[in-house]
Amino acid sequence: MKPLLTALIALIAATSLLAGCGQKGPLYLPEETPSAPAQSQ
């Protein structure tokens, strides 16, 4: 029974680590868009 429990815990740990990857692909910083100054008339 103990090897089965150890294998189950290892499977759950591996699954949770793989599920926590998040976004796939390269990481990037969002481009900053300069805001236009408001003009009053």
Image (spheres, rainbow, N blue to C red):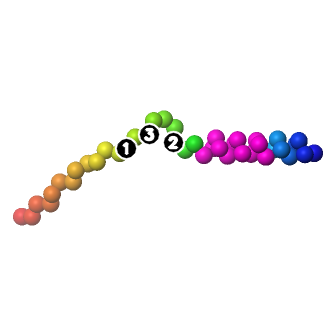
Mark 2 — residue? Answer: 23
Which residue occupies the foreground of this view, 10 or 36? 10
Are the two marked residues, 1 and 2, in contact with CB atoms closer than 8 angstroms? no
Pointer 2 local density, CA inside 10 Å: few below 14, some 14–19, many at least 20: few
Total residue callouts: 3
Q: In the rendered view, would you say 36 is above or below 1?
A: below
Q: Is residue 12 magenta?
A: yes
Residue 4 position within the rendered picture, expressed as x and y whole percent measured from the top left: 88, 42
Quarter holding residue 28: top left
Question: Circle 2 — which element?
Answer: loop
Q: For the residue marked with disc 2, what is the amino acid?
A: Gln
Mark 3 — residue? Answer: 27
Question: Circle 1 — which element?
Answer: loop
Which numbered circle lies on residue 29?
1
Kindly identify the residue that appears in the image at 48 percent across and 35 percent down.
Answer: 25
Kindly identify the residue that appears in the image at 17 percent across and 54 percent down.
Answer: 36
Instruction: From the viewer's perspective, tell me whether residue 25 is left or right of residue 32.
Output: right
Instruction: From the viewer's perspective, tell me whether residue 6 is left or right of residue 35.
Output: right
| Nearest-to-viewer mark from 1 and 2 | 1
- Which quadrant is home to the N terminus? top right
Instruction: From the viewer's perspective, tell me whether residue 36 is left or right of residue 2.
Output: left
Which range is magenta? 9-20
